[in-house]
Image (cartoon, rainbow, N blue to C red):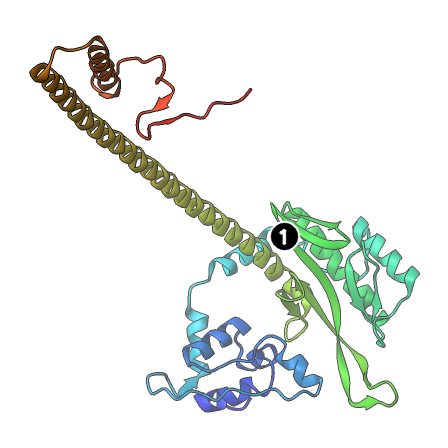
Amino acid sequence: METKTITRQELYQQVWSEPISSLSPKYNISDYELRKLCKELQIPLPKHGHWQRIRAGKQVPIPALPSNETVAHEMDFHRLAEAKATAPLSPQELLQEEIEQSLQKVLQVPAPLTNPDKLIAATRANIEERNVTYRFTELLTTAYGFLDVKVSRQSLNRAFRILDTLIKALQARGHRVMVSDYQAYIYIRKERYEVALREKLKRSTEIRPGNYSYDYTTTGILVLKIGPSWNGKEWQDGKVPLENRLSAIIAYLEWKTQHEEEWRLECQKEKEVRLEKERVLREQQARKEQELLRFKHLLQQAKRWHEAQQLRAYIAAEAQQVDSSSPQSTERKEWLAWAEQKANWYDPQVNLSDELLDEVDKETLVFRKKALF
């Protein structure tokens, strides 16, 4: 681009005219930096799959640029590049420098492929034996159980040289590349990342007559993808060829692994804190429930004691009434003794044993249920 100073409105129009991945190199900044800048300027960005729908000829609505007087309305990319040049290196950039120093010779992609890794040798044999192209294109493909490679025959040798160098550099860092579950993965400690290499295609402008599809031609531009198809990160040929980006790829993998480990550790700590809080709450609730049970028992004891006193008062009144009217009969004396015995059985301060009533719940005055067997 001729100018490096653009307005917010112009940047909004540009991000909706071409993908971020092709726009950011024009300003000599990364995709992440351009997205971050748009976020600061409150510029809406295309969602995932937007450009695929555009290429398919679909109409996709474009959100309007929100008006906001508090954000900048002009951006000087010259100053942004100068600030970037003088800014301290990020942890990922420092890691990349360390990798380049420690693997200076290993990272050099050789012109001829010599002594390839066994995974490279097996994948090359498979792709040459199958000789299968991918979806009406000139891209050769591998079967499941090998490295995921989709490139033209002209780019095949270069693709294997890049992958072989990457695998050996990863091994030198103590990492592994293996095929598991029919998919090739890079293993960084306990983390694993899908890995695939493909060649970019250029679609024709006209639909092929008869089957409503487009013709595609190969471009020679290789793209290395790390991660799942829906959420992976890509590196591709550009001003810097893919051969010279291997250190950045390894640095990203190691940085992301450390980030994932720290995130999992933080999640584990949060889980432990949450579980401890839940344990304390459960214990507090159990103590509350136990305290309530104790109080209910106290209340029931007090009620029983009060009712036992009422019983004794009634029994005394009955005895006095008998004494004042006529001599007590034997039957009346036995009833008074029986009543006093039941009052003592019911009184929580006495709890006299009663052979006939010991199986009765004194709170409900109902016989407790007994197992039949």
Q: Position of residue 84 (x, y in %)?
A: 45, 72
Whether residue 68 is visible to the viewer of this picture, yes or no, is yes
Q: How many marks?
A: 1
Q: Nearer the viewer, residue 2 or 196?
A: 196
Where is mark 1, residue-wise?
Answer: 103
Q: Position of residue 14 (x, y in %)?
A: 54, 87
Which quadrant of the figure has residue 250?
Answer: bottom right
Q: Nearer the viewer, residue 230 or 303?
A: 303
Left or right, 69 with reference to 49: left
Name the quarter where the N terminus is drawn. bottom right
Residue 261 position (above or below residue 241): above
Crowd around label 1: few <14 · some 14–19 · many ≥20 (10 Å): some
Q: Position of residue 67 (x, y in %)?
A: 39, 89
Q: Residue at x 43, y 81 (%)?
A: 42
Which quadrant of the figure has residue 230?
Answer: bottom right
Q: Nearer the viewer, residue 249 or 241?
A: 249
Q: Residue at x 31, y 33 (%)?
A: 290
